[in-house]
Image: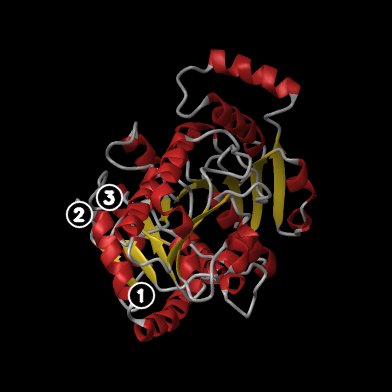
Amino acid sequence: MKIAILTSGILPVPAVCGGAVENLTDFYLEYNDRHHLHDITVYSTENGAARKHRSTSSAVNHYVFVDTESMLSKIIKRIYRLVNREEYYHYTIEFYLAKALRDIRKHHFDAIIIENRPGYAIHTRMFPRHSKIIYHLHNDVLNINTARHKELYAAADRIITVSDYISKRVKTISPDDTKCITVHNGIDIGMFATNGRKHVGRAALGISESDFVIVFSGRMIPEKGISELIEAMTILKNEPNTKLLVIGGAFFANDTGTNSFIDSLVEKAEPIKDRIIFTGFVPYADIPDYLNLADIAALPSTWEEPFGLTCVEALAAGLPVITTRRGGIPEIATDECAVIITPDDNLPRQLANAISAMTASPDRRKEMSMAAKKRAAMFSKERYAEHFFKALQ
């Protein structure tokens, strides 16, 4: 098939600036490059590093870079903002979309994949006739409470979701839905395997070899449950050799401003600051090194997690996981490799109890570690890409 891909309109593809959706797009484009399945054109925001990336030399994946940030584009964008006040997304995104569609209309595409922005489909009247419209939903962005949900649902020929949970949310619009198909996300499993890598040592972080280390990895936002996890550590005040390694920042690497939530976490951790290590932002390529310092992972999301890539990453590193029954997480973690908590009003106590039980059970941790690696193999980037392209048929 001849396929066009509309990206987020913010971060570029290839994913030189990161972004979960952009990295996952890279994965299936890499697979297409190896197997020559389809002729794909990606509409990305302009970025010099992305334009020079080796992926752009592919014979089957083509990249059109949409300028949204040059001085001329910024002027035109401001005018666009004044003229187009009734659009669906922020005017910066709508400006990217308008420019991408201008090029799309010059070509024939069998299918147009919309990455996580179903609102783009409001403009389907501008798409080439007979092109199939396919949503790839990474978040809970299409449900009965979504603006213009009936219109958006009707516009799609296929809806690929990252979890059964997201499919279930789409089905609040149409209980008899036949458009949704779940394709679970994937990661580079080999990247997270231990393989004896020791690029970061415990001593460098003030952790001794005899310490029991819990790792939290992810964005430092309230929905990830990091505040409750720190409270759990205060409950375990009589276990001085239990340490918490917190990997991550508020958002991306360039987010250097103050953050009141992170400030509150540091304040909450003050009484036990010798047992909690905040790394701040860590480049994605270095995350495996930090995971491999830990004995277990704790990822206690308090919101309905659409999927949970950090959970897969921890499992791939061979870590038993303590997590929560939220959103798509139970589709990843099983009782063989994880302690799955149904959160109640005292989540910190639940977490503390789970941590204590894991600390006291080395044999169980060993069994769970083996099960974790086996489970993670179900979410490889190769399997993800294979299933993604099957879903397009």
- The label nearer to you, 2 versus 3, is 2
Sooner in the amino-acid sequence: mark 3 or mark 1: 3
At mark 2, the secondary structure is loop
- Label 2: how many residues lie within 10 Å, few (<14), some (14-19) or many (20+)? few
Sooner in the amino-acid sequence: mark 1 or mark 2: 2
The quarter holding residue 38 reads bottom right
- Residue 359, position in %: x, y? 36, 75
Residue bearing the label numbered 3: 171
| Quadrant position of the N terminus in the picture | bottom right
Q: With 224 as the anchor, is 206 left or right in this view?
A: right
- Residue 353, position in %: x, y? 26, 66
- The label nearer to you, 3 versus 1, is 1
Residue bearing the label numbered 2: 344
- Residue 203, position in %: x, y? 60, 68
Q: Are marks 3 and 1 in contact (CB under 8 Å)?
A: no
Q: Residue at x 57, y 70 (%)?
A: 192
Residue bearing the label numbered 1: 359
Distance, label 2 to label 3, CA atoms, is 27 Å
The quarter holding residue 207 reads bottom right
Front residue of 295 and 375: 295
Q: Residue at x 35, y 35 (%)?
A: 151
Distance, label 1 to label 2, CA atoms, is 22 Å
Q: Amino acid at mark 1?
A: Thr
The quarter holding residue 239 reads bottom left
At mark 3, the secondary structure is loop
Instruction: Indicate whether 261 appears above or below 69.
Output: below
